Image (cartoon, rainbow, N blue to C red):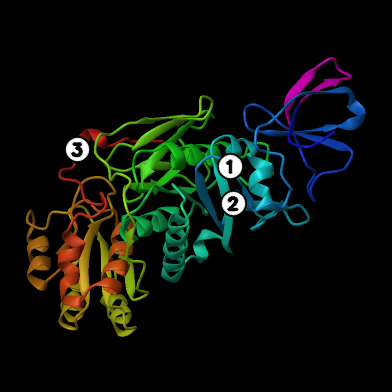
Amino acid sequence: MEVYKRVRLYLESGEVVEGILLPPTAYTSPDVYVVKLRNGYNVGISRNKVKRVEEIGEVAGTKIETRAAEIDTGKPWIAVIATGGTILSRVEYSTGAVYPSADPSLLFEMVPEISEIASVRVDVLAEKFSEDMTPADWTAMAERAAEHFRRGAIGVIMMHGTDTMHYSSAAMAFAFKEAPGPIVFVGSQRSSDRPSSDAFQNILGASITAVSAPFAESVVAMHGASSDGKIYVHRGTRVRKMHTSRRDTFRSIGARPLAEVDVESKSLRMLVDSFKARGGLSYAAKFSDRAALVKFFPGMDPRILDAIVDMGVQGVVLEGTGFGHVRDALLPAVKRAVDAGVVVAMTSQTIYGRVDLYVYRRGRELLSLGVVPLEDMLPEVAYVKMSWALANFKREDVPAVLRTPLAGEITPRSDPEAFIGEL
């Protein structure tokens, strides 16, 4: 039997299984048929339980070599840049641990339907879990995405670990002033060899977004519910991971998702009217490693901030309480930092709502010291923007850059109805 053919398996039990026949991997027995079902999941069926196998058609554009790094179907090109993470990971069954793999063939094994949507190039940039990402990796991502846009890609997919995906999506949002298409971050909460993996539909949803979306923004495309079928596309500067293991962990904060993808009909529906349209290519890919994100906590020792300044940090984003406050004992350390030329900005740990340093005395004291209030910018996004601004602008211009809306990171007003409550 040829792989990537649509087949029907008649089992000894009387059941009938229909799907796409996939090639064996290092993790499957040669005595097992691996079939991708219509719902996106793979099922393994022992050959001795199969009475008969019937070919019922060939899947368009998927007759490829297992280790192929691209498929040319005559459709527009998209680039898939692999950086690692759970979406390209396997379980090491001897230990039970998950480890990253950057084998490009895994993409075509997992989701051969991609070739029905676009021509695909797979490019391995890194083999990292997302907690190991650094600002230097953001620079590499931006440069590689720009390279593929120059080669004619109409969209770029970044396969990325979920834990820091919202940092990287924000980084690409600031890096690209203009782009020919979207940069779509996609990952999975469960490794691709698990029966409950969300990888298949997430990748398919990201591919539909890369081809069909009218916008050219950095976005995150992940499950919109715990069940299958719906992918939400979140703006890269308004999204956050909200749960450690749920498949619908990513939520837009203080804003609506940009779009919704139906993976069954392979269609995209816009949920907002305002977005950055596809255009030319203009980007600034540099990021500084001299930015820091510091969460205030009760009893916080001022020496913590002093130590960060002494390390040579040039910009600090404080994650304060409520409207953006820290304890009185921290004010001398804040003043010392500002006097030393460090840009100090304020966000809130409440997630929803916005910083307002004019309401209480403490806020006014922070303003008088030169602290930059960042409206409703999410703390992680503020840290990324600080890193980008420090690398691309003069130090004296950074406060103004931080307060200027560039990629949807600051909304005009905080809508109380945008609060979504519990997952």
Q: Please give the residue where the numbered disc 1 appears in the rendered image.
A: 199
Q: Residues within 10 Å of mark 2 (few under 14, many from 20)?
A: many
Q: Amino acid at mark 1?
A: Ala
Query: Compared with residue 392, is residue 359 higher up or lower down, i.e. above or below?
Result: above
Considering depth in this image, is 131 or 134 the residue closer to the camera?
Answer: 134
Q: Please give the residue where the numbered disc 2 appears in the rendered image.
A: 86
x and y percent of residue 363 in the render?
11, 61
Classified by dominant secondary structure, the portion drawn in magenta counts as strand
x and y percent of residue 205 in the render?
50, 37
Q: N-terminal of the two: label 1 or label 2?
A: 2
Q: Residue furthest right?
A: 48
Q: Residue at x 32, y 72 (%)?
A: 291
Q: Quadrant of residue 381?
A: bottom left
Q: Please give the residue where the numbered disc 3 appears in the rendered image.
A: 415
Q: Amino acid at mark 3?
A: Asp
Q: Residues within 10 Å of mark 1 (few under 14, many from 20)?
A: many
In the image, the segment drawn in magenta is 7-20
x and y percent of residue 297 in the render?
30, 63
Q: Nearer the viewer, mark 2 or mark 3?
A: 2
Check disc 1 and report its element: helix, strand or loop. Answer: helix
- Quadrant for the N terminus, please: top right
Considering depth in this image, is 131 or 22 the residue closer to the camera?
Answer: 22
Position of 19 with respect to 305 (left or right) is right
Q: Nearer the viewer, mark 1 or mark 3?
A: 1
Position of 296 with respect to 222 (left or right) is left
Q: Any magenta on residue 15? A: yes
Tell me if label 1 and label 2 are in contact, CB under 8 Å. Answer: yes
Q: N-terminal of the two: label 2 or label 3?
A: 2
Report the disc number at residue 67: none
- Quadrant for the C terminus, please: top left
